[in-house]
Image (cartoon, helix red, strand yellow):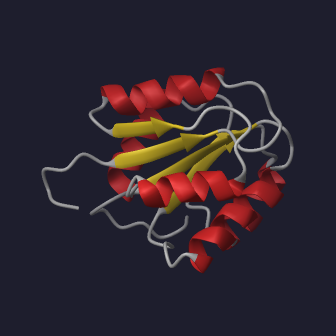
Amino acid sequence: MSATSPLRVVVAKPGLDGHDRGAKVVARALRDAGMEVIYTGLHQTPEQIVETAIAEDADAIGLSVLSGAHMTLFKRVRELLAERDAEDIVVFGGGIIPDADLQPLAELGVHKIFTPGATTTEIVQWVRGNVGDASASPA
């Protein structure tokens, strides 16, 4: 990515969850901050999300998970990225995710989880500081 290229972020709603307002708000905030955002829509499989990220040359994937299936869905996305030699794509997300699952998700390689109450400003600042040319180790 050159210094003048905007960050490219895929925002996705994996699984059966049909509530996408939060994902759309985050997608718009990232876009308004100058990033290129590819919103995949509802009911995407991890395979579809990873394929989109690779095809779009994305720097990051942001997953919104409200269904309770976050451990399975984040793990599968990370596995598929590894299989496709695309582990440089930063994975972050948000939703209704218990505090007890934050560390296990980090251990899977999920870089950041935003829980209810996170502001769009926090999310934009984190993406700017941790995606692309910035250091992006899981935290």
Report the residue that reaches farthest toward the left.
4
Residue 40 falls left or right of residue 45: left
Q: Position of residue 58 (x, y in %)?
A: 40, 55
Residue 114 at least partly seen: no
Which quarter of the image is occupied by the N terminus?
bottom left
Front-most of residues 84 and 138: 84
Residue at point 49% right, 72% down?
Answer: 86
Total marks shown come to 0
Front-most of residues 119 and 72: 72
Residue 9 falls left or right of residue 67: left
Residue at point 35% right, 67% down?
Answer: 135
Quarter location, residue 12: top right
Q: Is residue 80 above or below residue 58?
A: below
Q: Is residue 34 above or below residue 127?
A: above
Quarter location, residue 21: top right
Which quarter of the image is occupied by the C terminus?
bottom right
Residue 17 at least partly seen: yes
Q: Position of residue 99 (x, y in %)?
A: 78, 50
Residue at point 74% right, 65% down?
Answer: 75
Q: Position of residue 127 (x, y in %)?
A: 40, 48
Front-most of residues 86 and 120: 86
Residue 6 falls left or right of residue 122: left
